[in-house]
Image (tube, rainbow, N blue to C red):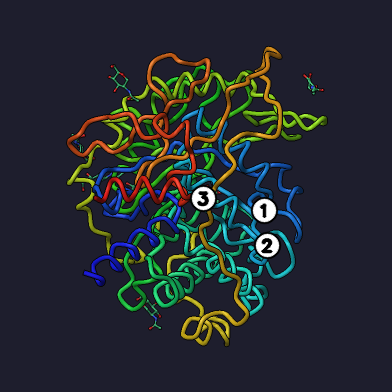
Amino acid sequence: MVSSYTRLLTAICALAGSAAAVTPLKVQGKDFVNSKTGDRFQILGVDYQPGGSSGFTKDKDPLSDPDVCLRDAALMQRLGINTIRVYNLEPTLDHNKCASIFNAAGIYMILDVNSPLTNGYLDRTAPWTTYTNAYYQQVFGVIEAFKSFDNVLGFFAGNEVINEDATRLAPAYVRAVVRDMKDYIAKQSSRAIPVGYSAADIRDILMDTLHYFECDLKNSTSSRADFFGLNSYSWCGDASYKSSGYNVLTEDFSNATLPVFFSEYGCNEVKPRVFTEVQALYGEEMTQAFSGGLVYEWTFEDNEYGLVQVNDNGTITTLIDYDNLQKQFSKLDMSRISASNSTQTGVDPETCSSSLINNSTFYNAWNLPDAPSKVSDYIKNGLPNKPSGSLVSVTATTLSQKVYDYTGKELTDIKLKVLANGESNTPSNSSSSSGSGTSSSSSSSGTSTHSNAASALNGAPSIALGGLGGVFMLLASLL
Ligand SMILES: *[C@@H]1O[C@H](CO)[C@@H](O)[C@H](O)[C@H]1NC(C)=O
Ligand SMILES: *[C@@H]1O[C@H](CO)[C@@H](O)[C@H](O)[C@H]1NC(C)=O
Ligand SMILES: *[C@@H]1O[C@H](CO)[C@@H](O)[C@H](O)[C@H]1NC(C)=O
Ligand SMILES: *[C@@H]1O[C@H](CO)[C@@H](O)[C@H](O)[C@H]1NC(C)=O
Ligand SMILES: *[C@@H]1O[C@H](CO)[C@@H](O)[C@H](O)[C@H]1NC(C)=O
Ligand SMILES: *[C@@H]1O[C@H](CO)[C@@H](O)[C@H](O)[C@H]1NC(C)=O
Ligand SMILES: *[C@@H]1O[C@H](CO)[C@@H](O)[C@H](O)[C@H]1NC(C)=O
C-alpha cells in the first residue's frame, strides 16, 4: 500500500516537475513524422533572427532574452507558426527559458550550429583551415545546449556553404560535419536528433548538392544528411506555380529520399507580400516533394523582409505581411497536411556513386576528410566543460510590450497559450483574423481535428506547468 502510494506520488511529481512538451519528431523516408502518433509533420515556419545577423554577439543571441521570446512566441502562435529556424547561437548562454517558451507554444526549432565568429564556421574557400578542434567547441556546444529539448526538430550543419565561391572540396567537408554531428548525437544524446544542410537556390548545382548529401555511403552511413533545406525566393508577388518555377522544383525533388523544405522563402520584390505561394507549397502536388517551409523572416530589418516591426519605444507592430500570411495559413486543410503517407515514408536512399553528379565542376567523390584530432574523444566522452540546457516552467504568459497592428490599432488580447502535452501549434481555422489565436490540434490520428487545450487552459496556464494547481489536476485525473 505504501509502495503504491509512493509510486503514485513519484509519478505525480515527475509529471508535475516537467512542463508540457511537444512530441519529438523523427525522419521516416521523405517525411517528418510525429514519433508518437505517426502523423506527418509539415513545417509552417519562420526564420528567427531579431536584430538581423548583426544582432548576434557572444552575450546575446535570439534565444537568450525570455521577454522577447515570450512576445514573439505569442505572436507566432496567433499567426499559426509551428517551427522557427535560428541561425546563430552562442552555446554558453542560458537558453532554457526561451526554448521552454517556444516548446510551451507548440513551436519546434531548427538550429544552425555555426556562428559568424572566429572558429564558428567553415571557410568555404579553404575548409581544411577551419575544420578544427576549436570549431567543434561551437558545433558540439550547440548540440549540448539544446539536445534535451523535445522541440528541437533538427540541426543544420551548414547554410549555403556550397556556392559559386566555394572550393570544389567543400561538399566533402560539410558532409564530414554531418557525420561528426550525427556520431556525437548517437553517443551523447538520448534522442536521434536529425541533422541536415541548407542549400542556396543555385539551379546549376542544386540537384548535385541534393544527391551528394542524400546518398547512402556504405563505409560512413552516419554522413548521410537526414533532411535538406532549400533557400528559395522564386515566387514573387502574385506569381503562379509555373511562372515561379515551383513546378520544376517539385519535379526535381519528387524523387528525394529525405524530407525537403524551404529553409527560407518569401520574395519581397513585390510589396506588400501576399504569400499566395502558401497554397501551392502546401497543395497536393508540392507536398509530395516538400515538407513545408520557413518564411524569411520574423523581424523587419535593413533588408526589408519581416512580418513584425520592433519599434524604438519597445513596442511591436504586426505588419501587413503578417496579416497576409495569417490569411493564407488559415485557409490550409491541416488534416490533409498532417495525413501520414506510407509511400512517402517507405522510400530508401540511393547508394553514393559518381554517376549521381552531373555538373563536372561539382565534387563527385565521397572520400571524406578525417575528423580533427580531438573529435573522436569528444564523441566518446562528451565535450569537456560542455554547456547544458533543460526545460523549465513557463509561468509568465502576458506580454510586457504593447502590440499594434499595421493600422496602428493596439492589440490587447495577445497572450502565450500554453498547449497541452503532445500538442503543436496550428493555424486557427475560420477567418478569426481579429486574433483569438485559438489553435486546433495537429493530431489527426482518428480523432480528426479537436480544439486543443489552449482555450481550456486559458484561465489557469499554470496547470500544465507543474504548479500546485497542476498537481491537484493531475491527481484528479489519475484517480
Ligand atoms: C555547372 O555549374 C557551374 C557553376 O558551378 C555553371 O556555371 C555551369 O553552367 C554548370 N554546367 C552545367 C552543364 O549545368
Ligand atoms: C524520378 O524517378 C522516376 C522513376 O525512377 C524517373 O522516371 C524520373 O525521371 C525521376 N525524376 C527525376 C527528376 O530524377
Ligand atoms: C502519397 O504519396 C505519394 C507519393 O508522393 C502520392 O503519389 C500520393 O498521392 C500520396 N497519397 C495521398 C493520399 O496523398
Ligand atoms: C511606439 O512607437 C510606435 C511606432 O512608432 C507608435 O505607433 C506607438 O504609438 C508608440 N507607442 C507608445 C506607447 O509610445
Ligand atoms: C477549417 O475548416 C474547413 C471547413 O470546415 C475544413 O475543411 C478545414 O480542414 C479546416 N482547417 C483547419 C486548419 O482545421
Ligand atoms: C543529368 O543531366 C541529364 C541531361 O541534362 C539528365 O537527363 C539527368 O537526369 C541528370 N542526372 C541527374 C542525376 O541529375
Ligand atoms: C568510403 O567509400 C568512398 C566511396 O566508395 C571512398 O571514396 C572512400 O575513400 C571510402 N573511405 C574510406 C575511409 O575507406
Q: Residues within 10 Å of mark 2 (few under 14, many from 20)?
A: some
Q: Position of residue 206 (x, y in %)?
A: 46, 48
**Badge 3 amino acid:** Ala
User: Of the residues under marks 1 and 3, which one precedes in the sequence?
Assistant: 1
The response on whether ligand 4 sits within 8 Å of label 1 is no
Identify the residue shown where x is 48% and y is 81%.
379
Q: Earlier in the sequence, mark 3 or mark 2?
A: 2
Disc number at residue 33?
A: none
Q: Quadrant of residue 291?
A: top left
- Snapshot quadrant of residue 449: top left
Check disc 1 and report the residue beneath it: 64
Q: Residue at x 65, y 29 (%)?
A: 308
Picture quarter with the N terminus: bottom left
Residue holding disc 3: 199
Label at residue 93: 2
Is there a contact, CB below 8 Å, between mark 1 and mark 3?
no
Vertical side of 410 occupied by 446: above or below: below
- 3D distance between C-alphas at marks 3 and 2: 28 Å
Question: What amino acid does circle 2 point to?
Answer: Leu
